[in-house]
Image: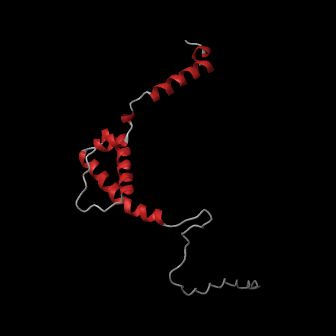
Amino acid sequence: MRNQKDLAISRREFARRAAFVSAAATLTPSNLLSAESVSAALPAQQPANAPKLSPEGQAEVDSRIQSIFAQYGSRLSDAQKADIRRLATEAQPPLERLRAFPAENGDGPGLYLKPLIERERKPSPRPAIPKPASAPKNS
């Protein structure tokens, strides 16, 4: 069995490996991580009744779809991929409306339980008054 000391890595070795990894990351091709190659990989299939989105909204939808496909793409069928595209596109307009709502850090919660109709309160039932115990009968 290996010793615990053999498995440990020194600070100097760690720094050396970290320097190699950071140097290798700078040498990767720049087009490998560009957004243009990602969007070119997926053909845009917009259904006829798709909502009209702003360019920022469309970019957000594309990035959301891309992240889902990157994580689960190998497990999804073509029909499931089409459903994900449709659902991501349909979910964007409500998200944009929600984000447009002005909110500050000091604002309270927007959900208070307020009745729409004021109802009459029923009178509370009076507690039952106990009857006095009857005197024992002497026979």
136 or 22, nearer to the observer: 22
Residue at the farthest left position: 48
Q: Quick check: 84 left or right of 136?
A: left
Which quarter of the figure is the C terminus placed in? bottom right
Residue 48 seen anywhere in this rendered image of the structure: yes
The picture places residue 11, in percent across and down from the top left corner, at 62, 21
Q: Quadrant of residue 7?
A: top right
Q: Residue at x 32, y 40 (%)?
A: 37
95 or 74, nearer to the observer: 95
The picture places residue 32, in percent across and down from the top left corner, at 37, 34
15 or 111, nearer to the observer: 15
Figure colour scheme: secondary structure
User: Does residue 120 sit above or below 113 in this rendering?
Assistant: below
User: Does residue 133 sit above or below 68 in this rendering?
Assistant: below
Residue 10 seen anywhere in this rendered image of the structure: no
Q: Quick check: 74 left or right of 18?
A: left
2 or 91, nearer to the observer: 91
Q: Residue at x 30, y 52 (%)?
A: 85
Q: Residue at x 40, y 63 (%)?
A: 94
Which quarter of the figure is the N terminus placed in? top right
The picture places residue 135, in percent across and down from the top left corner, at 76, 85
Q: Quick check: 97 left or right of 69?
A: right
User: Does residue 127 sit above or below 37 in this rendering?
Assistant: below
Q: Quick check: 70 left or right of 20?
A: left
Q: Quadrant of residue 73?
A: top left
Q: Residue at x 38, y 57 (%)?
A: 57
User: Does residue 139 sit above or below 107 in this rendering?
Assistant: below
